[in-house]
């Protein structure tokens, strides 16, 4: 019996190199599509860290304003503590504090790649006499 006759009767076992390469390519394409979408959703979910910080600042400002003639310009003196959000994805800043309003900003940090959150790297809450609940910008980020 020749070698050719011996292999003709056996079933093929395992994968061919072509099948293996095809499977790797399919997995690569799926990963190339899924990974950016996943990272975008993670960045979007981390915006909650900014919302939480800005709304806490708003509450502290209103508490301060109830006892004083104007809003305060210092996060530390308001009782906020550090100028970083709780999870560290945003640095915080207060601007234009006056008797009638202020602007609180959350600036995305490099932690976790949050600074790659295009269009939402800076989230702002601006309280004025005309808008005491605060204008939230950019609107698509809230």
Image (cartoon, rainbow, N blue to C red):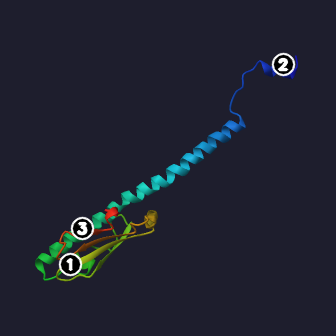
Q: Earlier in the sequence, mark 1 or mark 3?
A: 3
71 relative to 107, above or below: below
Indicate the position of residue 111 as horizontal and vertical percent values: 44, 66
Indicate the position of residue 25 as horizontal and vertical percent values.
63, 44
Residue lying at 22% horizontally and 76% vertically, measured from the top left = 78
Where 33 falls versus 84 (above or below)?
above
- Residue on which the image places disc 1: 101
Badge 2: how crowded within 10 Å, few (<14), some, or many (20+)? few
Q: What's the distance in space between the residues labelled 2 and 1, CA to CA? A: 91 Å
* Horizontal relation, residue 3 to residue 100: left or right: right
Between residue 107 and residue 29, name the one nearer to us.
29
Give the quarter of the image for residue 57: bottom left
Reading the image, the residue beneath label 3 is 56
Q: Nearer the viewer, mark 2 or mark 1?
A: 1
Of callouts 2 and 1, which one flags the residue occurring earlier in the amino acid sequence? 2
- Numbered badge on residue 111: none
Q: Secondary structure at mark 2?
A: helix
Left or right relative to 125: residue 41: right
Residue at 20% from the left image edge and 74% from the top image edge:
61
Q: Earlier in the sequence, mark 3 or mark 2?
A: 2
Q: Image point 19% across, 79% down: which residue?
A: 71
Q: Is residue 121 left or right of residue 131?
A: right
Q: Point out the image quarter for the C terminus.
A: bottom left
Q: Which residue is rendered at x = 45% and y = 68% of the image?
A: 110
Mark closer to the observer (1, 3): 1
């Amino acid at each position: 019996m020749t070698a050719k006759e011996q292999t003709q009767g056996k079933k093929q076992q395992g994968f061919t190199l072509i099948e293996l390469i095809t499977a790797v390519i399919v997995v690569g394409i799926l990963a190339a599509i899924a990974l950016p979408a996943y990272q975008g959703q993670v960045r979007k979910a981390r915006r909650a860290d900014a919302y939480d910080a800005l709304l806490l600042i708003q509450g502290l400002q209103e508490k301060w304003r109830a006892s004083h003639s104007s809003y305060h310009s210092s996060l530390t003196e308001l009782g906020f503590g550090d100028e970083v959000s709780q999870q560290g994805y945003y640095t915080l800043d207060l601007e234009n504090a006056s008797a009638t309003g202020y602007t609180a900003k959350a600036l995305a940090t490099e932690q976790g790649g949050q600074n790659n959150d295009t269009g939402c790297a800076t989230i702002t809450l601006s309280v004025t006499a005309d808008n005491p609940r605060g204008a939230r910008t950019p609107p698509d980020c809230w």
